[in-house]
């Protein structure tokens, strides 16, 4: 029964160097377990039949002591299985816990919004891209509850506990797209924490990285600004629909007046927005706490310009031309032409369909 089964089809096709150790231990324990089940069930059935065949007055458990040799053998074989499982698993376990020193380091952030991967050059994506043959080390943290990093094909399974940095590493062996998800139930609202690992041949990976890490390539300033809203973490505190989160909404922010805690009336122009991003606690909007992270040193001038350009498209005082249609879901390509031609753009107009299209285009590009 066991011999005829195709062992390799029990775990997904292995795609990392780790798989050898993990699979050997897994199948070893699996076979030992199956053997024990068959042995115990077989003996139980045999004994039941033997006892049933005796005459009535002979029924019941046999008296006397158990056979010492058989008893010893039984204990020894159980211990042997445990020792074997330990010995078979140990090398893989030690290996999985010691990432090579020069591994390519990717920071992983897990939250109910999904996984975010930050590459050494600062590029942020929601899928994990790696090169085959290069060890990749993941340093994972969670922003809320317990999650885990589960990549069956790469034999990676690491819990991510709040307040700690979980570490995992692997070396992908064959190019392909592999399922990555949180294998931990984190509550009803955290169901679909799922994305993918895309393993490229090394040259393809380098080309991909060059292409995606320049956020301005193939994007208008407004589109780059919208992208930065997600990748720089603004989304966590600023809504786009006018609702108040930790910070004020980005809707109708640009060009509007508001009061600061200090009682000063300010117009949110480009210069003010720049200061608000770099040193937000210098003047704090009335009704809010000074909790925004100062972005000084974490954002470039061009990125601030892009965010500002995008914020203008979200405001009725953004200076958009009278003809700008805030309800139309302009196809991404059209939007790009419009904004390349003129000052203002419809690219990131707050219509959900246009946003979805833009997000989709971004995701496609990331592939
Ligand atoms: C940790 C939450 C948090 C994050 C992340 C955050 N902000 Fe803020 N932001 C706030 C809060 C709170 C305020 C209001 C208090 C203040 O003025 O400092 C604010 C204020 C602002 C203002 C001024 C708003 C106004 O009405 O005058 C701007 C502009 C702004 N943030 C831009 C950004 C941008 C751009 C990013 C991302 C690069 C960002 N914020 C990330 C919390 C955050």
Image (cartoon, rainbow, N blue to C red):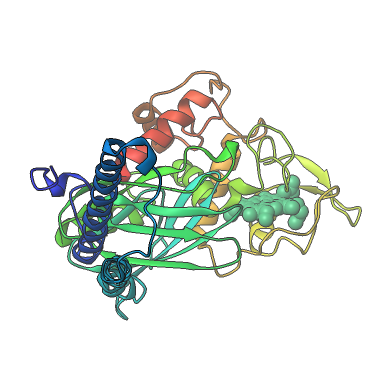
Q: Residue furthest front?
A: 57
Residue drawn 59% across and 37% down?
189
- Can residue 292 be spotted in the picture? yes
Q: Quadrant of residue 136?
A: bottom left
Q: Position of residue 259 (x, y in %)?
A: 85, 47
Q: Is residue 100 above or below residue 171?
A: below
Residue drawn 47% across and 23% down?
353
Assign the C terminus to one quadrant of the image: top left
Q: Residue furthest bottom?
A: 101
Q: Is residue 365 above or below residue 25?
A: above
- Direction from residue 142 to residue 89 in the image, left or right: left
- Direction from residue 356 to residue 239 in the image, left or right: right
Q: Position of residue 21 (x, y in %)?
A: 22, 66
Q: Quadrant of residue 17?
A: bottom left
Q: Position of residue 281 (x, y in %)?
A: 76, 63
- Direction from residue 106 to residue 92 in the image, left or right: left
Q: Is residue 351 above or below residue 248?
A: above
Residue drawn 56% across and 68% down?
164
- Can residue 273 be spotted in the picture? no
Q: Nearer the viewer, residue 265 or 341?
A: 265
Q: Position of residue 34 (x, y in %)?
A: 24, 50
Assign the N terminus to one quadrant of the image: top left
Q: Residue furthest left?
A: 4
Residue drawn 69% across and 35% down?
252
Q: How many discs appear?
A: 0
């Amino acid at each position: 029964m066991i011999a005829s089964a195709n062992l390799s089809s029990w775990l997904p096709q292995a795609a990392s160097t780790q798989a050898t150790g993990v699979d050997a231990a897994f199948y070893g324990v699996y076979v030992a377990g199956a053997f024990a089940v068959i042995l115990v069930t077989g003996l139980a059935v045999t004994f039941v039949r033997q006892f049933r065949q005796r005459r009535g007055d002979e029924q019941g458990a046999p008296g006397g002591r158990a056979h010492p040799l058989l008893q010893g053998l039984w204990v020894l074989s159980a211990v042997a299985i445990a020792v074997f499982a330990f010995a078979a698993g140990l090398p893989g376990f030690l290996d999985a816990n010691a990432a090579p020193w020069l591994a390519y380091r990717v920071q992983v952030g897990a939250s109910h919004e999904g996984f975010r991967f930050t590459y050494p050059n600062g590029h942020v994506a929601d899928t994990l891209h790696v090169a085959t043959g290069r060890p990749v080390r993941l340093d994972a943290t969670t922003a809320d509850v317990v999650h885990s990093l589960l990549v069956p094909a790469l034999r990676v399974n690491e819990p991510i506990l709040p307040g700690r940095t979980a570490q995992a590493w692997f070396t992908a062996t064959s190019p392909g797209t592999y399922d990555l998800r949180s294998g931990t139930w984190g509550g009803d609202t955290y169901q679909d924490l799922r994305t993918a690992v895309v393993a490229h041949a090394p040259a393809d990976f380098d080309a991909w990285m060059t292409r995606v890490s320049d956020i301005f390539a193939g994007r208008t300033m407004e589109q780059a600004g919208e992208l930065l809203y997600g990748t720089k973490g603004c989304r966590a505190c600023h809504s786009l629909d006018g609702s108040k989160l930790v910070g004020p909404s980005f809707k109708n922010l640009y060009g509007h007046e508001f009061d600061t805690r200090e009682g000063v009336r300010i117009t949110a122009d480009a210069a003010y927005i720049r200061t608000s991003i770099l040193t937000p606690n210098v003047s704090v909007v009335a009704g809010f706490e000074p909790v925004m992270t100062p972005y000084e040193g974490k954002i470039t001038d061009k990125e601030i310009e892009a965010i500002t350009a995008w914020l203008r498209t979200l405001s009725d005082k953004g200076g958009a031309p009278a003809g700008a249609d805030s309800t139309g879901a302009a196809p991404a390509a059209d939007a790009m032409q419009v904004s390349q031609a003129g000052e203002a753009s419809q690219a990131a107009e707050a219509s959900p369909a246009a946003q979805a299209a833009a997000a989709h285009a971004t995701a496609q590009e990331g592939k």
